[in-house]
Amino acid sequence: MSKKDWGADGAKEYWFNTRTHEVEEGPQGLSVDRIGPFETRKQAEHGPEIVAERARQIREEDEQDF
């Protein structure tokens, strides 16, 4: 396994904390309260919208399968 696989490559990751509604640099809060990781702070700021859009796309794909 590489350092990247273990999260030790020095790359920054950003998370959206669903409890505090704040962006975290690196995982800081409880995992149950976080969504991510995101590559940029801006992506993390829009984390809930990104997750909702991905869920919508998955629902549409599932509906097409039936």
Image (tube, grey):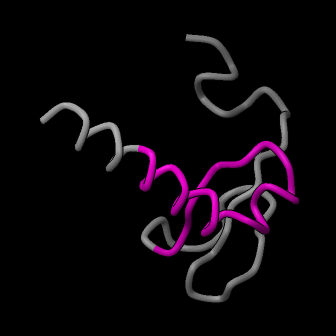
Quarter-wise, where is residue 36 in the image?
Answer: bottom right
**Foreground residue among 48 and 32:** 48
Q: Residue at x 42, y 54 (%)?
A: 55
Residue 16 belongs to magenta span: no
Identify which residue, 62 or 44, lies in the foreground: 62
Q: Quadrant of the C terminus?
A: top left
Q: Is residue 58 left or right of residue 43?
A: left
Quadrant where the N terminus sits is top right
Image position of 62 (left or right of 25):
left
Q: Total label count?
A: 0
Can you say whether 60 is above or below 34 in the image? above
Q: Residue at x 56, y 87 (%)?
A: 19
**Which range is magenta?**
33-57
Q: Residue furthest top?
A: 1
List x then y, in percent, for residue 20: 65, 88
Q: Quadrant of residue 26?
A: bottom right
Tell me: residue 26, above or below residue 6. below
In x, y percent, where is residue 44?
75, 60
The image quarter in which residue 12 lies: top right
Vertical order, 61 against 29 (above or below): above
Q: Verify whether residue 50 appears in magenta.
A: yes
Q: Which residue is found at the position 85% from the left and 33% from the top?
A: 10
Q: Main secondary structure of the magenta part?
A: helix
Which residue appears farthest toward the left when viewing the image? 66
